[in-house]
Image: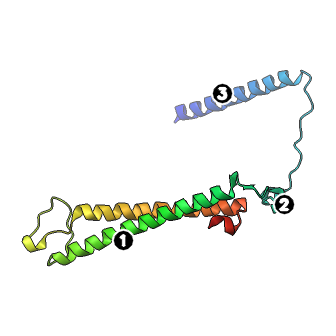
Amino acid sequence: MQSHWNRSAWRRASLAAFVLSLGLLAAAGAEEPAEAPVVPRPVELDRLLKLPAPTQVSRERIGNASQNEWRSRFTSARLEHAAAQTALDAAQLKMGEAATETESWQIAPPGAAVTGASDAPVNYPLRQEIRRQREELARSERSLQELTIEADLAGVPGSWRE
C-alpha cells in the first residue's frame, strides 16, 4: 500500500512540474509584444438559419441547376423507382406461382434436409431476387426523397419537379 501512495505522489509532482513548465513557456511568450486579439463579429442566429429569399436567387438557375436539369433529375429518379417497383412485383408474382406448384409452402435454407419430395422448399434464388429487389426499391425511394429535400431547401418550384 505504501508503494501506491508513492506512485500517486510521484504522479502529482510530475503533473505539477509539467503545468509549471507550461506556465513558464506561456510567460516567456507573453513578454513579446502581441498583436491585439481579433474579436469575431457576432452573427445573428436567425440570419444563419434562414433560407435565402426568392428574390436573392436567380430564376434561371436554382441550386446550381436549371429548370431542365431539375426536371431531368426528378424524371430519372421516378423512372428508377417505377422500374424497381415493377421488378419487385414480377419477382413476387414468380414466387407466388412457384408456391402454388408445390403442395406445401415450406421455406428451408439451401442444403437443409427435406422430408419427402412434396416438402420441397420454395425456390431459394427467387427469394434472394425478391430481397435484392426490395433493397433496390428502398434505395430508389431514399434517392427520390433526398432529391425532394434538396429541391425543397433550394426553393425549386413545383413546376420544375414534373
**What residue is at 70 percent from the left and 27 percent from the top?**
18
Name the amino acid, label 2. Thr
Compared to residue 50, the image places residue 37 above or below, namely above
Crowd class of label 2 (few under 14; some 14 to 19; many from 20; radius 10 Å): few
Residue 146 pos. (x, y %): 58, 60
Q: Is residue 9 left or right of residue 142?
A: right
Which label was assigned to residue 55? 2
Compared to residue 1, the image places residue 92 above or below, namely below
Name the amino acid, label 1. Asp
**What residue is at 33 percent from the left and 69 percent from the top?**
90
**How far apart are labels 2 and 3 at the CA level?**
63 Å
> Which residue carries the number 3 mark?
14
User: Which one is nearer the viewer's eye here, 115 or 33?
Assistant: 115
Residue 135 pos. (x, y %): 41, 61
Residue 91 pos. (x, y %): 31, 68
Residue 83 pos. (x, y %): 43, 64
